[in-house]
Amino acid sequence: MTVPQPPEPIPGARLLFSLDPSVSHLNHGSFGAVPIGVQRAQQRLRDEMEANPLRFFTQGLVDRIAHTRRHLATFLGADPDGTALVGNATTGAAIVLQSLALGPGDEVVTTDHGYGAVGLSVDRECARTGAVSRMLPVPLTATDEEVVEIVRAGLRPGRTRLLIVDQITSPTARLFPTSAIVGVAREHGIPVLVDAAHAPGMLPTTVASVGADFWVGNLHKWAYAPRGTAALVVAEQWRERIQPLVVSWEQGSGYPTRVEWQATLDYTGWLAAPVGLFTLRSLGVDRVRAHNAALAAYGQRVVGDGLGVAPADLPQPGGPTVAMRLIPLPPGVATTMDAARELRARIADRLSVEVSTAAWNGRGYLRLCGQVYNTPDEYDRLAVRLPTLLAQG
């Protein structure tokens, strides 16, 4: 089987970013990269804020945030009245969890593909309320139909108060059939929180088409917003129950304003986020999505070949639009989170390559991303040099 051809580069795209050119940044999925134009837009807003802080915060800022929210919600295909801007997907998940009034006998169901920080939030809320958490194992090779059936069998009507599933899983770069999962849970009246941290900008799927009770996604990853920009979307029947993690002066305004307003928070990242969408649209949203997914597929294949992984053993993401790919590491390598972190640091220090590494179910994995500032030769070089680094232990 031949290696897939890399996509044609998007002219000028690399120049839009201020990334260190001596480093191969193959891990866009973790912290994103903010285009220079977006950085400058945020700095202009900061200059405005610092020129007269009292005026900035007290004259029209709530309305400016609401205008930004409507713009971002439209891009996501979400109801602006049900959308609140928050710091990140983990914050959104924590807001939902503490708003549900969990108690003894209740349970929160997750899968073993979930994001670690969200899992910690579940554990804390269960410890605080007396509820319990239960994790459903989902094989990496499970088909969409098998995933849905695993979830169906794992729900306990009357006890399960919340199901949390990822739209794109962080540790395993897997696209989950979220709409079908939501449908199964709805049959039993069980609300669903979709952790869509990687969806905005990467996937064409709209929030409305997912149909979840709660949906939270980051715009600072694949939608080029400043870091700390995410959207929490809540179905109408739940909005009055959603409370902020910290009460501030807009508490009486109801959802979503009471969630967004945190007094002296730096809101300039949110206000600059539409410039990120402008950048994405200028490059061509569909063009960027196709480029990034094809480049990630190319990188997975060449690095997998370099490590001796057969093409059939390379996990597939479940769709051609996913711009993150997983590569199994040799047996015994990075089998714990500490070992995975140490390996990531060694790759960065010795190879000048930023990647994501994870230990999942006792196996180490390398996760690669594709973005418009990446080039095929970056993956080619990693494929040549990584086996030597791993052999050195």
Image (tube, rainbow, N blue to C red):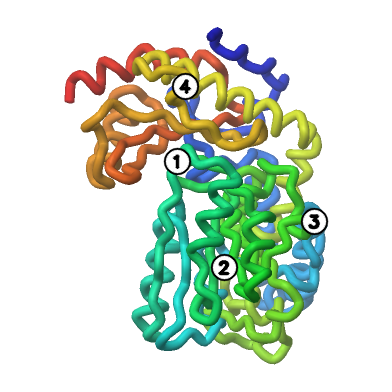
Instruction: Please tell me in which quadrant of the rendered image residue 125 appears.
Output: bottom left
Left or right: 84 in relation to 142: right
- Mark 1 residue element: loop
Residue ID at (57%, 29%): 370
- Mark 4 residue element: helix
First in residue order: circle 2 vs circle 4: 2
Viewer-side residue, 58 vs 229:
229
Residue ID at (71%, 57%): 210
Q: Is the residue 142 above or below the residue 355 in the image? A: below
Residue assigned mark 2: 92
Q: Amino acid at mark 1?
A: Leu
Q: Are marks 3 and 4 in contact (CB under 8 Å)?
A: no
Q: Are marks 2 and 4 in contact (CB under 8 Å)?
A: no
Residue assigned mark 3: 77
Q: Amino acid at mark 4?
A: Ala
Q: Are marks 1 and 4 in contact (CB under 8 Å)?
A: no
Q: Amino acid at mark 3?
A: Gly
First in residue order: circle 3 vs circle 2: 3
Q: Are marks 3 and 1 in contact (CB under 8 Å)?
A: no
The answer to whether residue 386 is visible is: yes
Q: Are marks 1 and 2 in contact (CB under 8 Å)?
A: no
Estimate the spatial distance between the alpha carbons at disc 2 and disc 4, rounded to whole Å. Answer: 37 Å
Viewer-side residue, 54 vs 272:
272
Residue ID at (50%, 42%): 142
Q: Amino acid at mark 2?
A: Gly
Badge 1: residue crowd in 10 Å (few <14, some 14–19, many ≥20): some
Instruction: Please tell me in which quadrant of the rendered image residue 149 appears.
Output: bottom right
First in residue order: circle 1 vs circle 2: 2
Which image quarter holds the C terminus? top left
